[in-house]
Amino acid sequence: MKKIFYKLKAPFIFLLTLIFTFLLATPVSALPFTPYAVGVSSATNSSVNGWSMQNTKFVVSGLFDGIGGADLAAVYDYGNNNMGIILLPEGNVSQARTIYLTGAHNWDMQKTKFVTAGDYDGDLISDIAILYDYGNNDLGIWVFSGGVSPSLYYKSGPNNWNLGSTKFVASGNYDGGSPATTDITVMYDYGNNKMGIWNFLSSGSSFLPELNYYSNSWNITSTKFFLSYDFLGDGYNDIAAVYDYGNNDMAIWVFDADPRGNRYIPSIYFRSGTGNWSLKNTKFATIGVVPMITMVYDYGNNNMGIWNFYNLAPGSFTPALGYISGSGHWSVENTKYFYDGLFLNVDSPLGAAAFYDYGNSTIGIWKFSYALSGPPL
Ligand SMILES: [Ca+2]
Ligand SMILES: [Ca+2]
Ligand SMILES: [Ca+2]
């Protein structure tokens, strides 16, 4: 199946580009992404001896082994309450190895609610943070640093934190500081359109929660994506929230981090207008290093598009189609995770990676190398 991806014909792509340009009334520049596969696992050739997508509960990206480019890491359910972390160096399936196992009866996968990655202890190697539900509204945040035992950075205590009301979690350095420790930012639903953005500020060994934004007119069920990035380039990670106004009208809000004022200042950077963007068809949104927000769009008929929203000027995003597979070439439904930027490609430091489920215990990691100049197709 994978070979069909190489058979895309340029005129076909050009025609599709024209069609979608017309349909979306959005500017389309050159197509800067070229996909290639870096590994496909199977029961016979994978070092992890087969791969169950069903047991893959979370996948995060980061610089986990300190070598080369960014890696992927999967939080994997081995059964019997045994949780493992599998490292995929630079996304290479053939080099996948389990780097941590809790051991049987030591970890309840059902209570593992959110997984995110960042450098929480400031040693320049990415760590994995897991938000764990102890029941009775008692939240624990465990940090797994490379090669060492996990450490409980935070525990709210009973009746202090409802994980059911915790809707989005992202990692980013909200407050700057030295060493630069990554903090965890969450969007919390207080009900009745009341929303709060909390930061769990990292000291390097613990988290201190702080409420930095509160709104009584924000509908969390209309919020589709929540991303952390320093859009304004002042050293403090801002938040982008992708919001559905209905009637295929989408907006990207940016919450400008102002840690010296213990607050965020929100504004709309992009709004598609009615009939121009379906968030139901938008499966992933991620951050690029250009800087940009990248979204994976399902056109139906196994036709997948990658859109880049470039943050070229303060206060705005400019959308451009980065890649389109063509009908019958890519199932968005089978695409389970998608990551952008973060040096995922060693040979091309800007790119994206998709975690693709072929069924029958076979996964593929597809990379999209990014070229700033010239269309490769
Ligand atoms: Ca670290
Ligand atoms: Ca910090
Ligand atoms: Ca900022």
Image: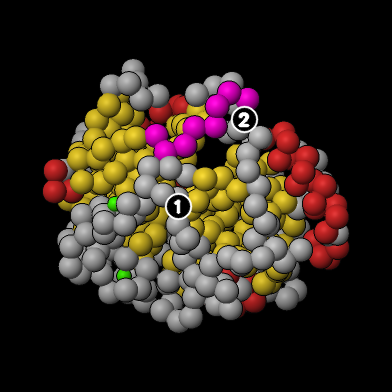
The percent coordinates of residue 338 (x first, y second) are 57, 54
The answer to whether residue 27 is above or below residue 183 is above
Residue in the picture at 49% in, 32% down:
271
Furthest toward the left, the residue is: 260
The percent coordinates of residue 216 (x first, y second) are 28, 21
Of pointers 2 and 1, the one earlier in the residue sequence:
2
Tell me the CA gap for discs 2 and 1.
21 Å
Horizontal side, residue 129 vs residue 59: left or right? left
Picture quadrant where residue 20 is located = top right
What stretch of residues is rendered in magenta?
268-276
Residue in the picture at 53% in, 59% down:
340
The percent coordinates of residue 25 (x first, y second) are 66, 35
Residue in the picture at 45% in, 27% down:
221
Three-letter amino acid code at the position of disc 2: Asn
Q: Nearer the viewer, residue 115 or 38?
A: 38
The percent coordinates of residue 328 (x first, y second) are 83, 48
**Colour theme:** secondary structure
Is 4 colored magenta in this rendering?
no
Which image quadrant: the C terminus? bottom right
Q: Which residue is mark 1?
A: 312
Horizontal side, residue 38 vs residue 174: left or right? right
Q: Nearer the viewer, residue 100 or 271?
A: 271
The answer to whether residue 217 is above or below residue 242 is above
User: Residue 176: which disc?
Assistant: none
- Looking at mark 2, is its residue's CB closer than 8 Å to ligand 3? no
Query: In the rendered picture of this protein, how many numbered marks are placed on residues?
Result: 2
Q: Which residue is mark 2?
A: 276
Local packing at callout 1 (Cα closer than 10 Å; few below 14, some 14-19, many 20+) is: few
Which image quadrant: the N terminus? bottom right
Picture quadrant where residue 206 is located = bottom left
**SS under mark 2:** loop
Mark 2–mark 1 CB contact (< 8 Å)? no
